[in-house]
Image (cartoon, rainbow, N blue to C red):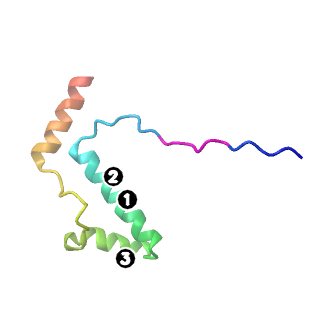
Amino acid sequence: MAARKRQPAKVKTVADEDYSKLDQYAIELHEFFKSLRRAGFNNDNALWLLSAKDSFPDWLQKAPTAADVRKHLEDEEEDD
């Protein structure tokens, strides 16, 4: 019997590496939520921890300011 060839590992690529602060914040919140779920928290407790700003890990960025959000919206309007 011939040995099977190993398939190279699939690599996920990111389509757009130019994320706004709002995008980065949303991604980090989502990753934090998924980590809490993997750790065994139910949905309610994980969402409660997400709403408790004091429970955030050090690596999580602070929420973007209103000016950051407006800037991102203005950039999208210019693309249209």
Characterize the local packing of mark 2: few (<14), some (14-19) or many (20 or more) Cα atoms within 10 angstroms: some
Residue at point 38% right, 74% down? 44
In this picture, which residue range is highlighted in magenta?
7-12
- Which SS does the magenta portion mostly show? loop
Q: Nearer the viewer, residue 52 or 61?
A: 61
Q: Amino acid at mark 3?
A: Asn
The x, y position of residue 25, in whole percent, is 26, 52
For marks 2 and 1, give the CA distance.
6 Å
Q: Nearer the viewer, residue 20 or 6?
A: 6
Residue at point 45% right, 39% down? 13
Q: Secondary structure at mark 3?
A: helix
Characterize the local packing of mark 3: few (<14), some (14-19) or many (20 or more) Cα atoms within 10 angstroms: some
- Which dot marks residue 27? 2
Residue at point 44% right, 70% down? 37
User: How many labels were placed on the picture?
Assistant: 3
Examine the image and state in which quarter residue 47 appears.
Answer: bottom left
The x, y position of residue 50, in whole percent, is 29, 68
For marks 3 and 2, give the CA distance.
19 Å
Residue at point 46% right, 76% down? 40
Q: Say if 56 sits above or below 75 in the image.
A: below
**Residue under pointer 3:** 45
Q: Say if 53 sits above or below 62 in the image.
A: below
| Marks 3 and 2, the one that precedes in the sequence | 2
**Residue under pointer 1:** 31
The x, y position of residue 6, in whole percent, is 69, 44
- In the picture, measured across the screen, residue 8 lies left or right of residue 74, that is right
| Marks 3, 2: nearer the viewer | 2
Q: Secondary structure at mark 2?
A: helix
Callouts 2 and 1 close, C-beta under 8 Å:
yes
| Marks 1 and 3, the one that precedes in the sequence | 1
For marks 1 and 3, give the CA distance.
15 Å
Q: Amino acid at mark 1?
A: Glu
